[in-house]
Image (tube, helix red, strand yellow):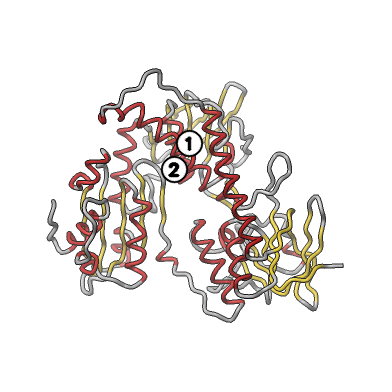
Amino acid sequence: MSQQFDVIVIGAGPGGYIAAIRAAQLGYNVACIDEWASADGQPMLGGTCTNVGCIPSKALLQSSEHFEHAAKHFGEHGISLKDLKIDVPKMVARKAAVVKQNNDGILYLFKKNKVTFFHGRGSFVKAVQSGYEIAVAGAKPETLTGQQIIVATGSSARALPGLPFDEENVLSNDGALRIQAAPKTLGLIGSGVIGLEMGSVWRRLGAQVTVLEALPTFLGAVDEQIAKEAKKAFDKQGLKIELGVKVGEVKSTKKGVTVAYTNAKGEAQTLAVDKLIVSIGRVPNTTGLNAEAVGLKLGERGDIVVDADCKTNLPGVWAVGDEVRGPMQAHKAEEDGVAVAERIAGQHGHVDFNLVPSVIYTSPEIAGVGQTEQQLKAAGVKYKAGTFPFLANGRARALGDTTGMVKFLADAATDEILGVHIIGPMASELIAEACVAMAFRASSEDIARICHAHPSLSESTKEAALAVDKRTLNF
């Protein structure tokens, strides 16, 4: 007999598990289904983010950053080391341990909030009088019935046409996180976030890294001034970035991968590498959902069509995260999940896409929220800009990391903050102040008049706000 639930969530990534917990907090009887499994068949909750995305990539970035500091910068602090080496398998094992801690943490949160978890692949069976029948395919097949269904199945890496991932030589984010030895040469097709982050990891460990980007500009979605600063930093580090290329035939053999391409000048080129990471975007995970069984409407990309409230074309069926409109960010998926759970409860959940920060965890880190300068220009919005370099910040000097800047964009008439963009140390943490300020529609003057601790990196945020009015104090 089918088990009955008020809410069934399909997928336990950031959007799904957060939606399940919030729905349970609101008093609903909730089930969550997820199929991620370890080699021994154990559940691995957290989706792409926890298992092959945000969390493991940050673990490897931290390890490789420690190694680079030891190799290149410890001497500046009077610290000398002999016979420095990196144990890559141990580094990867640490990454796996960090992932498992997060997996287990979500299971704990489900128990704490009385969310019932089912391990397997969830799919629609049919609409019934009490909602929808959902099948769970796995070691213990189940049939569930739910009044409200939240689809949170996430996304997968997009492969090059005719070149599937083998995760040995041609790598998605999954394979890039499982490399057991630093390759001598590494190629990246696309300057996506995962590609740049993984390129940074293996460059620090000795790989010669080449990035092939089809667009004529680097990091086109990032504020142009910040993107140019990033490219200068990456060039200095030895990351080879070719823009405006057209990728042709790609061949993978036991010896490695060769990529035929045409450069921006129209010249035929060949890149030979040990490993190739393809980072050209992601596609929604809706295959196998059996959407046609209930008439769930999908878009041309396989995405789920929803309205502004994440409602699908079916009553009682919602969708959140990477398979719906909006930025493909784990934290955006979480906000979607909370908002939908609250809407089910008759509340007014809300997500403002303009306030979803984006972060690239390279070195230097890149973070931004709101509008970029090129977007404001294109929209004809009159604005004021202010920047402050970390080179003039005392804490950054003490850290020995003075690359980059903080940039404020404010309305020319009202001084309301329209966008904040940062490249430099701890940009991922500094951007939070901008998100809070913009949520309360603060002006640049508001930030400029708030006392910031000294010495701190956050003083650069205050100084950039002062720069909007052309009155910085330390530059």
Give the residue displayed 44% in from the left and 29% down from the top: 268
Query: Considering depth in this image, is 306 or 52 the residue closer to the camera?
Result: 52
Relative to 319, 198 lies left or right: left
Q: What crowding class fits label 1: few (fewer than 14 Cα within 10 Å), some (14-19), or many (20 or more)?
A: many
Instruction: Estimate the x, y position of residue 145 in percent, counting from the top left.
Output: 78, 70
Residue 29: quarter of image:
bottom right
Give the residue displayed 37% in from the left and 45% down from the top: 218
Relative to 398, 86 lies left or right: right
Q: Which residue is mark 2?
A: 191
Give the residue displayed 55% in from the left and 68% down from the top: 338
Q: Tell me the amino acid under the disc marked 1.
A: Leu
Residue 473: quarter of image:
bottom left
Outermost residue toward the top in this view: 83
Instruction: Estimate the x, y position of residue 18 in percent, counting from the top left.
Output: 58, 63
Mark 2 secondary-structure assignment: loop
Q: Which mark is residue 403?
A: none
Outermost residue toward the right in this view: 1
The answer to whether residue 390 is above or below residue 81 is below
Specify the quadrant that holds the N terminus. bottom right
The answer to whether residue 96 is above or below residue 349 is above
Instruction: Estimate the x, y position of residue 456 in percent, counting from the top left.
Output: 25, 51
Q: Tell me the amino acid under the disc marked 2.
A: Ser
Q: What crowding class fits label 2: few (fewer than 14 Cα within 10 Å), some (14-19), or many (20 or more)?
A: many
Are the residues tagged 2 and 1 within 8 Å (C-beta)? yes
Q: Which residue is mark 1?
A: 188
Residue 26: quarter of image:
bottom right
Outermost residue toward the front in this view: 112
Relative to 223, 98 lies left or right: right
Mark 1 secondary-structure assignment: strand
Q: CA distance from mark 2 to mark 1?
A: 7 Å
